[in-house]
Amino acid sequence: MSAHTQPFQYRLPRPVVGVFPGAHPGQMVGNGQLFKRHDTLIARPDPRRIDLRASLLDPFGNYQVRVQQQQSAVDVFLLADLSASMGFVGNNDKRRVLADMLLSIAASALEYGDNVGFIACNQQVLTDCYLPAGKHMGRIQSLAERLQKRVFQPGSIGLLQAQRYLPNHRALVFLASDFHVPLPQLQAILQRLSRHDVIPLVLWDQAEYSRLPDWGLFQLQDLETGKRRTLWLRPSLKRKIETAFAQRHSQLQHHFRAFGCEPLFIESGYRSEQLAQYFLKRAG
């Protein structure tokens, strides 16, 4: 496992609604270490957990049983935008960044005992890339290899249908995209994912907008439409491009924060330390 795909630690902001035991604080009661409440022996017929002190203090004379909070597992998904713009190769190949991210998230989830799944979209949900939540690291490694060789196709409207492939209960969803989409479409995507804990991962590359020459001919290509355009770069146009990206950065932050999630901008390749620090800041 490379340094880029090392596992990281993550914590959830609220108790998990999950039946299966795991590593996260849950809303279920069962065999746990954290005391949750007292209940009567009739309601919870487990004499091993009788609390004599609480039973003596009960005004109705009922035996009181200690009820523990169960640690629960959560389903973890990487929801990826595989539109043509995500095939950009600059300082880093975004396909390689996405593959590293998938391997790192999967390794982290499996260390916690959580299930991990993958959903990919362009104009539609790509069923040949879909992996339901499970513990299938071999299939994930194979998929990561295929992602690095795949030719991405235009369109990202399939993200609007992705919630159909997510569970009805709350899941941890890493949403990876460059988010070069109209803001109303982004709002619609976030609204459909509102029942889940969403972590937006904004995949940009500094070669897209920074360190441009001050003067000279510069050829651009829109990866979504395939159209090419030649520009005469000059300092004023260079500043205009950099300002447009800075404004887009602020717009994305504003829209994500309005839906209760903080975006993580990944512009220099993926490193697991980035997500580890993200979750530490969120917990603080």
Image (cartoon, helix red, strand yellow):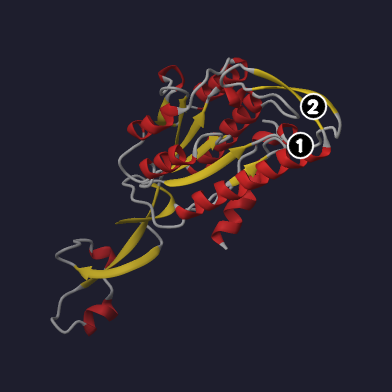
Horizontal side of residue 138 vs 197, given as left or right: right
| Image vertical order of residue 226 relative to residue 180, above or below | above
**Picture residue at 28% right of the left edge, 66% below the top:** 49
Q: Residues within 10 Å of mark 2 (few under 14, many from 20)?
A: few
Indicate which disc residue 237 carries.
Answer: 1
Indicate which disc residue 232 carries.
Answer: 2
**Residue 95 locus on image (x, y percent):** 62, 24
Horizontal side of residue 110 vs 67, given as left or right: right
**Residue 139 locus on image (x, y percent):** 50, 21
Indicate which disc residue 275 carries.
Answer: none
* Helix, strand or loop status at disc 1: helix
**Picture residue at 51% right of the left edge, 45% below the top:** 199
Q: Quadrant of residue 235?
A: top right
Q: Nearer the viewer, residue 225 or 29?
A: 225
The quadrant the N terminus occupies is: top right
**Picture residue at 60% right of the left edge, 35% below the top:** 104
**Residue 150 locus on image (x, y percent):** 58, 15
